[in-house]
Image: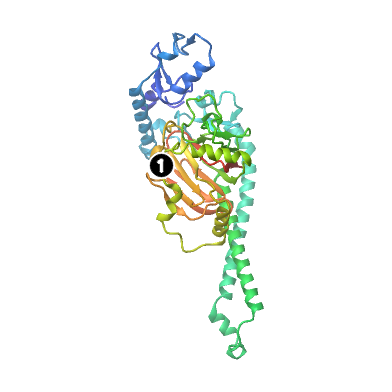
Amino acid sequence: MAAASPLRNLEDEVLCSICLDYLREPVTIDCGHVFCYHCIIKVCESSRQPLYCSLCKTVFKKENIRHVWQMASLVENIWRMKVEEERQPREERPPEQRAENLCRRHLEKLHYYCKDDQQILCVMCRESREHRHHAAVLLEKAAQSCRGKILNHLKILKGDRDRIQNFQSTGEDEIQALLDPGDIMSRYPRKKFWIEKPISPAVKKRAEEFSDKFLSLEKGLRGFHGKLMRDLEYKTMKIVLNSQTANGYLLVYPNGKSMIFTGLWINKYQRGQRFDPEPGVLGSKGFTWGKVYWEVKVDRIWWGEEEEEAMKFRAGARGMFGSSCLGGFLGIADGYASPVYRNESEELEEEWSQETGIWPKFCLVGVARESVVRRGSLSFTPEEGFWTLQLSSAGVCICTSTEPFQILSYCPRQIGIALDYDGGKVTFTNARTQEFIYEFSSSFTGRIFPFLWLNCTRSRLTLRP
């Protein structure tokens, strides 16, 4: 086990004894011990009276729980010190931290592999409440069973990539040769051209068909190449929504993969971790390392007779969602120029948006930091812990300041989200065509969760796969 550093000693003082992680919203109880606010609230909700401290077994009362703001500032400073220390070159770090395989949270050597969460763990992580009941094996044993499969899979994928690149290169050369006027003139003497006669409709139609097929083939190759490269770099995750964080107006399906905005308050009890009044929800699994990928599909649904009542309800509840960065969103397209070039996929997506009329008012897809504020009107910017796209029939916008900025005049129906935690990137693509949409660059701290936001009863957001 690595020798404890001064920073490690400070870290031990700001860890919650319940979740074994950094104190989040630290509070103190009657005996003076400090815990995370959400951890001690869970103890109060799950335990019968009287309540006992988990450290000294002293009786305490829920109404005497108090926030310790100075401790919250201390935790934040220690976290920043740890981030700065990890950014130092390896040769400048203390000897006990120069090993490459150290846990980022506890600075211990990594010995175990958690089969349930597919994460590499140190001894302290293995004994934490998060992984205590999971199936974990030694790294050497896990590597032996996976190394051969991974190498064979990579070999196959790399072979496919090489063949596609060769095919694409050959096809581009042939097409350039066919489209070169000088080459055509050298092949065919001038006397063989019917210069005075117009091109027949049949020939023109065949040429147009050939051009369409070529564009379709090029689009398919580009999409396949993008998907192949993504599969080699990122791990596709099956994301499930955490209904405990869902706003009261959201209905999360039992399988946790889809949600809709009901327009009616359906959750009787409001818990501390829910968004209120913003109609947002987090995924059930957060990430602190690695490269992961998932997709969000936007569907239009109809409520029949109930839709009219929901519309009346929303008409009487205007102003309920007052996010500073979402004001005037429906008219945002008037302030920006649309792109001059429009390809086939853009036209198809725009057709769909026009057919759906007001689909949707707007929705947000992306990621959020676990520690984001969940009360009151929110500003969905990276400074506040949100990295999201705004989708509506007007197009796609981003929030990097208090006002949204439009980047697309059409809206894809399926968005791909790639999170590179260590690289500090969140990349958005059109999941159907693999076309790039936007990329955030940031320095992540803490756990990052998938995030969805929806306020229109005519739409449904679904996580894929």
Instruction: Please give the residue where the numbered disc 1 appears in the rendered image.
Output: 381
Please tell me how crowded label 1 is: few (under 14), some (14-19), or many (20+) other residues with Cα within 10 Å: some
Q: Is residue 303 above or below residue 220?
A: above
Q: Three-letter amino acid code at disc 1?
A: Thr
Q: Position of residue 372 (x, y in %)?
A: 43, 33
In this rendering, position of residue 326 left or right of residue 163: left
Q: Is residue 125 visible?
A: yes
Total marks shown come to: 1
Relative to 306, say whether 351 is above or below: below
The percent coordinates of residue 297 (x first, y second) are 58, 45
Residue 283 occupies which quadrant of the picture?
top right
- Residue 392 image offset from top left, x and y in percent: 50, 48
- Residue pictured at 61% horizontal, 67% vertical: 212
Q: Position of residue 188 (x, y in %)?
A: 60, 85
Q: Residue at x 52, y 45 (%)?
A: 418
- Most distant residue in the bottom direction: 191
The residue that appears at 40% across and 43% down in the rendered structure is 325
Residue sticking out furthest to the right: 202
Snapshot quadrant of residue 77: top left
Q: Mark 1: which secondary structure?
A: loop
